[in-house]
Image (cartoon, grey):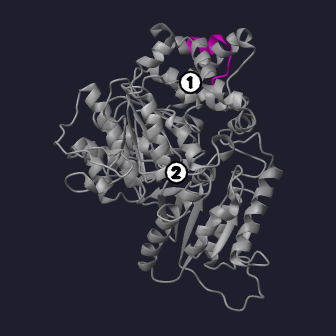
C-alpha cells in the first residue's frame, strides 16, 4: 500500500490521468457527485438506504485499495452528537497535537473551502495536496464503478473515503473523526476498532432521518460505540442516558464488568485552576471535558505521554452511569485547550466601529439559553458598557433544511436586535464560491426561505410591515447594508426624510447565526480587509524571537486567502480560518501565531 501513497505516485496519477490540477475543477468534480442535501432526501424516504450506507463506504474503500484491516490500523477517536461534536473534536486534536503527535482531523461542514474538512496537524490540506489526493481517489473510483453497478459515492461519502485514505497515506499517529449525521448508519461508522468514542450533547435535529424523539436520536448516536472501546458522554436528559446505557451494555464484551460508557465531569472539577479555552462560550466547558477524557484515553493506550491517575473514585450518577475520573491537567493539556481554534463557533471579530459575533448555531437547543443567544447577550452587553455612545445590534440570519424559523428566531428576540437582515447562503448574486455552492437549492428557493424567515421575525415581533428588517439577495449585499449603516451611524442609512428623529449609533454589534455556511460566506466577504501599520507589542516579541525586525505588516483577505508580507517582501500564505489567531506555516519557519486587532473595513 505504501507505493500507492507516495507523493510521486499521486502526481503521476494526477497528470497521467488527464485530470485538471486546479482547485476549481477539483471542487466542481466533487460537487457533481450527489450532494449531501439530495442524499438526505433519499435516505429519509428509504430505510434500506440507511442500512447499506456503511457497507457502501467499505466497498468504496476497497475499490481504492484500502482494506478494512488498513482502516483498523488507523488509531481513531470517533465522536457523535447533535451539538458540540465539532468543538469536541477540535479540542481533542489540539490536545494531542500539543503532546507532539501527528494528527489527522476530519470534520464537517466547512466554512469557506472544502479542504478545511481534512486537516493534518490542525492545518487544512494545501490546495495542491488536496487536489492530488482527490484525483487519485476519484480516478480509482471512476475506473472501478462498472464492476459496482456504476456506483459513485455521494459528496459526503466520497470525502469520508478520501479522509481515511489520506490519514493512512500520511501515517498520522491519531485520527479524530467527526460523525456526519447520526452515527449507526453514518459513513464514518465503517470504523470497527476506535480507541475511544465520544457523544456530545444531544438534541432534535435531522429528525426526518434520525427520528422525532430524543430517544430515537440517542439510539443513532450510540451506534458508534464498539466492543471493548472506552466511551464517554456529555450530560444528557434521563431518557437519552437510558438509551445510551442500553446500547453500551449491548456492545460490552462478555465478562467485562466495568461500564463501557462514562459521563464526563464538569471542567471545574479537575484539580487545579480551571484551564482557559481557545473557543469561547460556557457550553464549551462540557465539550472540553469530553475532549480531555478522549485524549487521555488515547494517551494511556498509546503510552508515549500519559498522565498518572490521582486515584479519584468514579462517582455514580442517579441513572447508574459512572462519572469519569478527574486528574491534574498537564501543561500539554492546558496548552492544547487554550490554543484550540474553531472558527465560526462563538467567534468575535472586532473592528473600529463594529464587532461581528459569529456562531453557526442551527438547532433550537444550540441557539437558545446557555448557548449562542446567552453568549451573544453577555459578550455584547459587556462590550457596550465600555463604549461611550449608543450601540446598535444587527442580526444577519439564514436557515436551511426543514428547520422551523420561528423556533430558532424566538430566543434571539430577547437580545434586543435593532435591525435584522435575512440573506441566503450566497456570497454574491449570480456568483457563488464553488466550495459553498448548493446545487440542490435554486436561488428562488433560497430567497423563498428568506421570505419565510422574515415573516417569522415579523410575527414574533408583532410587526405588520418589515420595520428595521429586510431581505438581501446575497451576503455581499448584507455587508453593504452594514457598511451603509456604519457610515451613516444610523439605521436610517437610506436617508428617509419622513423620519424626523434619528438615533445615532457609535458602534455596531452584528450577530451572524443560523447557518455555518452563512457564517463562512460572511468570513470570506471581499469587503473585509485588515491593515496593521505599526506592530503591536506582541508582534514585536514574535519578530524578535524569529530574528526579524519589527517592520510594518500588511494583512489582507484576497479571494479567501490571507497574505502577510514581512521585510524584504517575503510573502507567506496563511489559511483564512483563524482570523483572530492566524497560524503561519512555511518551510523555513516553525508554526507561530500572530495576534492582531484589524481596522474596520
User: Are there few (<14), some (14-19), or many (20+) residues within 10 Å of tag 1?
Assistant: many
Instruction: Give the secondary structure at mark 2.
Output: strand
| Residue at the extreme bottom of the image, as rendered | 500
* Nearer to the camera, 546 or 381: 381
Q: Gap between marks 2 and 1, in whole Å?
A: 31 Å
Compare marks 2 and 1 and give the one earlier in the sequence: 1
Which residue matches tag 1? 162
Above or below for 99 versus 353: above
Instruction: Answer left or right for 71 relative to 254.
Output: right
Q: Is residue 106 magenta?
A: no
Q: Is residue 81 left or right of residue 232?
A: right
Q: Is residue 154 at all visible to an observer of this figure?
A: yes
Percent from the top left, x then y, of residue 279?
A: 41, 53
Q: Which residues are magenta?
A: 11-21
Mark 2 surroundings: few (<14), some (14-19) or many (≥20) residues within 10 A: some
Q: Nearer the viewer, residue 513 or 149?
A: 149
| Quadrant of the image occupied by residue 232 | top left
**Residue sitting at 64 percent across and 20 percent down?**
56
Q: Which residue is mark 2?
A: 556
Residue 14 or residue 65, whichever sits in front: 65
Q: Is residue 398 found left or right of 279 in the rendered image?
A: right
User: On the rendered image, what quadrant is the C terminus found in?
Assistant: bottom right
Please say if 124 is above or below 398. Answer: above
Where is 398 relative to 134, above or below?
below
Picture residue at 56% right of the left edge, 55% below the top: 361
Where residue 383 sits in the image (x, y, percent)? 44, 73
Mark 2 and mark 1 in contact? Answer it, CB < 8 Å.
no
Q: Is residue 569 visible?
A: no
Amino acid at each position: 500500500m505504501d507505493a500507492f501513497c507516495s507523493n510521486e505516485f499521486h502526481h503521476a496519477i494526477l497528470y497521467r490521468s488527464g485530470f485538471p490540477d486546479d482547485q476549481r475543477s477539483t471542487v466542481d468534480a466533487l460537487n457533481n457527485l450527489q450532494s449531501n442535501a439530495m442524499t438526505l432526501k433519499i435516505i429519509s424516504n428509504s430505510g434500506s438506504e440507511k442500512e447499506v450506507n456503511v457497507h457502501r463506504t467499505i466497498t468504496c474503500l476497497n475499490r481504492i485499495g484500502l482494506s478494512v484491516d488498513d482502516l483498523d490500523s488507523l488509531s481513531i477517536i470517533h465522536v457523535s452528537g447533535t451539538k458540540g461534536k465539532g468543538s469536541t473534536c477540535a479540542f481533542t486534536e489540539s490536545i494531542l497535537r500539543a503532546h507532539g503527535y501527528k494528527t489527522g482531523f476530519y470534520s464537517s461542514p466547512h466554512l469557506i473551502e472544502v479542504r478545511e474538512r481534512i486537516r493534518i496537524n490542525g492545518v487544512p490540506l494545501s490546495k495542491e495536496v488536496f487536489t492530488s489526493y482527490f484525483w487519485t481517489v476519484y480516478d480509482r473510483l471512476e475506473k472501478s464503478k462498472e464492476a459496482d453497478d456504476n456506483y459513485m459515492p455521494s459528496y459526503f461519502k466520497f470525502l469520508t473515503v478520501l479522509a481515511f485514505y489520506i490519514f493512512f497515506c500520511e501515517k498520522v499517529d491519531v485520527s479524530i473523526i467527526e460523525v456526519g449525521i447520526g452515527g449507526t448508519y453514518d459513513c464514518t461508522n465503517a470504523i470497527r476498532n476506535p480507541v475511544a468514542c465520544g457523544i456530545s450533547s444531544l438534541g432534535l435535529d435531522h429528525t426526518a432521518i434520525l427520528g422525532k424523539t430524543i430517544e430515537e436520536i440517542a439510539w443513532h448516536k450510540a451506534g458508534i460505540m464498539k466492543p471493548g472501546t472506552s466511551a464517554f458522554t456529555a450530560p444528557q436528559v434521563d431518557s437519552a442516558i437510558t438509551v445510551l446505557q442500553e446500547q453500551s451494555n449491548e456492545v460490552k464484551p462478555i465478562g467485562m464488568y466495568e461500564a463501557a460508557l462514562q459521563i464526563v465531569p464538569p471542567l471545574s472539577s479537575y484539580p487545579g485552576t480551571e484551564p482557559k479555552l481557545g473557543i469561547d462560550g460556557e457550553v464549551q466547558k462540557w465539550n472540553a471535558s469530553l475532549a480531555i477524557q478522549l485524549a487521555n484515553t488515547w494517551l494511556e493506550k498509546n503510552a508515549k505521554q500519559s498522565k498518572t491517575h490521582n486515584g479519584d473514585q468514579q462517582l455514580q450518577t442517579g441513572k447508574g452511569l459512572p462519572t469519569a475520573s478527574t486528574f491534574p491537567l498537564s501543561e500539554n493539556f492546558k496548552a492544547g485547550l487554550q490554543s484550540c481554534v474553531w472558527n465560526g463557533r462563538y467567534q468575535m471579530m472586532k473592528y473600529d466601529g463594529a464587532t461581528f459575533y459569529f456562531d453557526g448555531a442551527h438547532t433550537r437547543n444550540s441557539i437558545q439559553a446557555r448557548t449562542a443567544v446567552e453568549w451573544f447577550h453577555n459578550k455584547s452587553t459587556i462590550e457596550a458598557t465600555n463604549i461611550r455612545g449608543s450601540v446598535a445590534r444587527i442580526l444577519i440570519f439564514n436557515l436551511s433544511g426543514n428547520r422551523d424559523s420561528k423556533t430558532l428566531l424566538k430566543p434571539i428576540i430577547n437580545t434586543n436586535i435593532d435591525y435584522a437582515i435575512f440573506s441566503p447562503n450566497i456570497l454574491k448574486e449570480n456568483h457563488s464560491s464553488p466550495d459553498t455552492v448548493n446545487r440542490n437549492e435554486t436561488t428562488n428557493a433560497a430567497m423563498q426561505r428568506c421570505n419565510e424567515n422574515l415573516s417569522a421575525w415579523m410575527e414574533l415581533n408583532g410587526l405588520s410591515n418589515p420595520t428595521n428588517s429586510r431581505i438581501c439577495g446575497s451576503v455581499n449585499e448584507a455587508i453593504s447594508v452594514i457598511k451603509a449603516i456604519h457610515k451613516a451611524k444610523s439605521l436610517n442609512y437610506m436617508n428617509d426624510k419622513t423620519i424626523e428623529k434619528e438615533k445615532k449609533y457609535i458602534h455596531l454589534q452584528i450577530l451572524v447565526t443560523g447557518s455555518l455556511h452563512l457564517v463562512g460566506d460572511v468570513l470570506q466577504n471581499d469587503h473585509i480587509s485588515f491593515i496593521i501599520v505599526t506592530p503591536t507589542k506582541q508582534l514585536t516579541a514574535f519578530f524578535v524571537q524569529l530574528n526579524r525586525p519589527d517592520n510594518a505588516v500588511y494583512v489582507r483577505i484576497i479571494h479567501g486567502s490571507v497574505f502577510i508580507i514581512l521585510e524584504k517582501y517575503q510573502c507567506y500564505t496563511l489559511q483564512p480560518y483563524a482570523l483572530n489567531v492566524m497560524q503561519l506555516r512555511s518551510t523555513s519557519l516553525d508554526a507561530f501565531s500572530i495576534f492582531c486587532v484589524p481596522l474596520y473595513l
